[in-house]
Amino acid sequence: MITSQTVLSVHNLQVSAGSNPLVKGISFEIKQGEIFALVGESGSGKSLTSLSIMRLLPEVLKITAGEVVFGQQKIFELTETQMNSVRGKKIAMIFQEPQTSLNPVQTVGVQLQEVLKLHQNINATDLQTKLISLLEEVGIPEPEARLKWYPHQLSGGQKQRIMIAMALACEPELLVADEPTTALDVTIQ
C-alpha cells in the first residue's frame, strides 16, 4: 500500500531469463528521506532489481511479474518517452562499473552536460558553473581542467565520482546506487 510519504514501492517483482527465475518476488517500500539498503550475496538479484526499477534490463531478461510505483506512476506502464523524462531527472542511478558506463570518446564535461541539457533548461554560463560545482562536490581536483579529460585519463575512483556527479546533477527525488563505493578510492569511501 502506498502512503503519501512513499517514494518507491516494489511489489512482488520477478525477473527471468527465459524460464529461469532470477529475482523471485521481492517487495519493499522506500519512504521520503529514507536510506534503504538491499543486501544479499553475490548473484542474489540486487543489481537486477535496480535495473528493473530504472527499466534498463538487458533484452534477454524479462520482468515476469510485479509492480514498481514511483510516486503515483506505475513504472512498467510508462511509455519509453515518459520513462526517459523520469530516468535521470526524478530517479537517477549510480552504476557499479564506471569503466563501462562512461563513453570513452567523450570528455567528462560533454557527458555531464548531456544529463543537464536533457532535463534542465540551463544557459551556457550557468551550465559551466554547475559542472564545476558538481565535480567539486564529489572531490574531483582541478574540476575545470578535468571537464576536458577523457575517462581513460581518470583513475577508477575518479570515474566513479564522475558517475556520482552525473547521478546527482538533476537533484533526483530517488537515487539508486548499485555498489557505489566499490570503485572509489579508499580515502574517499
Image (cartoon, rainbow, N blue to C red):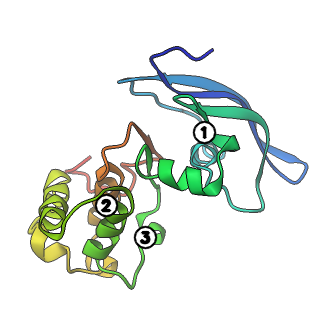
| Disc 2 to disc 1, C-alpha distance | 35 Å
In front: label 2 or label 1: 2
In front: label 3 or label 1: 3
Q: Earlier in the sequence, mark 2 or mark 1?
A: 1
Circle 3 sits in a helix, a strand or a loop, which is it? helix
| Disc 3 to disc 1, C-alpha distance | 23 Å
Circle 2 sits in a helix, a strand or a loop, which is it? helix
Looking at the picture, tell me which residue is in the foreground, 36 or 134. Answer: 134
- The residue labelled by disc 1 is 41
Left or right: 177 with respect to 51? left
Q: Earlier in the sequence, mark 2 or mark 3?
A: 3
- The residue labelled by disc 2 is 116
Q: Give coordinates of residue 96: x percent, y percent.
A: 47, 55
**Which residue is pictured at 66% across the width and 25% down the height?**
27
Vertically, is 135 above or below 189? below
- Total labels: the figure holds 3
**Which residue is pictured at 60% across the width and 39% down the height?**
41
| Disc 2 to disc 3, C-alpha distance | 21 Å
Q: Give coordinates of residue 139: x percent, y percent.
A: 16, 55
- The residue labelled by disc 3 is 99
Vertically, is 96 above or below 52? below
